[in-house]
Image: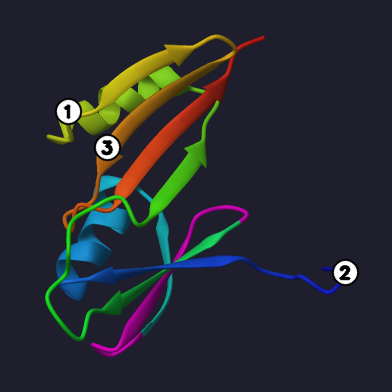
Amino acid sequence: MKSLKTTTVTAMVADLEAAIVFYTETLGLELKMRYGDHYAEIDAGNMDIGLHPAESAVKKGNNLSIGFGVTAFDEVVADLEAKGIRLNVIQEGWIRIANFEDPDGNQLFLAELQA
């Protein structure tokens, strides 16, 4: 994929406004663009997260996972916990992972490589 310039993962959401608040205010990411109530795009570093209102009921499950590589793992975990986010921290050899969910049950995780 020589011409790849951007990567966007799109999450189908039940409430676009609540999703924007979660990704911007709770997680501290930047809203890149918003097209009314039809679509929003969040800047997540080397990837964009598209938020699109679902046309039918959002099904909670494991059909999407968005990972955020962080360097200040403990600080980020503590910050999110202070904002009411429940995280499940797992040490898997050379990596620490903290699993959590957005308001629609989409699976998110923090990851920190261990030296």
Label 2: state its secondary structure: loop
Residue type at tag 3: Phe
Q: Which mark is residue 2?
A: 2
Q: Quadrant of residue 64?
A: bottom left
Q: Nearer the viewer, residue 33 or 3?
A: 3
In contact (CB < 8 Å): disc 3 and disc 1: no
Q: Residue at x 23, y 87 (%)?
A: 37
Residue type at tag 2: Lys
Q: Is residue 46 left or right of residue 103?
A: right
As for residue 40 lying within the magenta part, the answer is yes
Residue at mark 1: 82
Residue at mark 3: 100
Q: Which mark is residue 46?
A: none
Find the magenta span and give its range.
35-46
Give how far across and how far down residue 78 sits, in percent: 27, 22
Marks 1 and 2: which is nearer the front? 2
Q: Residues within 10 Å of mark 3 (few under 14, many from 20)?
A: some
Q: Residue at x 28, y 90 (%)?
A: 36
Q: Nearer the viewer, residue 101 or 18?
A: 101
Q: Is residue 63 left or right of residue 115?
A: left
Q: Nearer the viewer, residue 13 or 46?
A: 13
Q: Quadrant of the C terminus?
A: top right
Please state the total of marks drawn on the protein image. 3
Marks 3 and 1: which is nearer the front? 3
